[in-house]
Amino acid sequence: MLTRIIAASAFVFAASAANAQQQVDFASVDTDQSGGLSFSEVQAISASATQDEFTKYDTDGSGELSESEFDAWLNPTPQ
């Protein structure tokens, strides 16, 4: 559990750092223009992203993050 929290924090920190330089634009991360983000597309903007985190936020189990799922990853709600 602690590992997930640390990894999620690292991802959010990396995404926040990217946001400080430029806004993370879903369409530009979706390099294959499939309408969803694959794990490799997410890793391209955050090498610290893990498959477990990706699976956690892929709430519909599609194998890709929708824009709303990606937004939930970037802006997690406190538990």
Image (cartoon, rainbow, N blue to C red):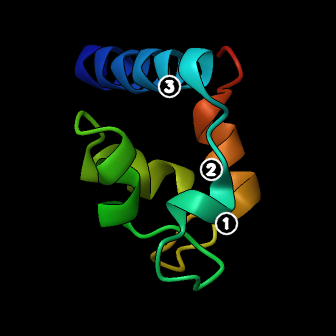
Q: Position of residue 74 (x, y in %)?
A: 61, 33
Secondary structure beneath dot 1 equals: loop
Amino acid under label 3? Ala
In 3D space, how far apart are the residues under numbered discs 2 and 3 (Cα atoms)?
15 Å
Amino acid under label 1? Ser
Q: Position of residue 20 (x, y in %)?
A: 59, 14
Instruction: Determine which residue is flagged by label 2.
Output: 70
Secondary structure beneath dot 2 equals: helix
The reply, left or right, for residue 17 in relation to residue 44 is right
Secondary structure beneath dot 3 equals: helix
Q: Is residue 4 visible?
A: yes
In 3D space, how far apart are the residues under numbered discs 1 and 3 (Cα atoms)?
19 Å
Which one is in front in this view, the residue at disc 1 or the one at disc 3?
3
Using the image as rendered, state which of residue 46 and residue 51 is in the foreground: 46
Badge 3 crowding class, 10 Å Cα cut-off, few under 14, some 14 to 19, many 20 or more, is some
- Position of 69 relative to 33 (above/below): above
Badge 2 crowding class, 10 Å Cα cut-off, few under 14, some 14 to 19, many 20 or more, is some
* Residue under the point 42% across and 70% down: 38
Using the image as rendered, state which of residue 38 and residue 56 is in the foreground: 38
* Residue under the point 54% across and 68% down: 30
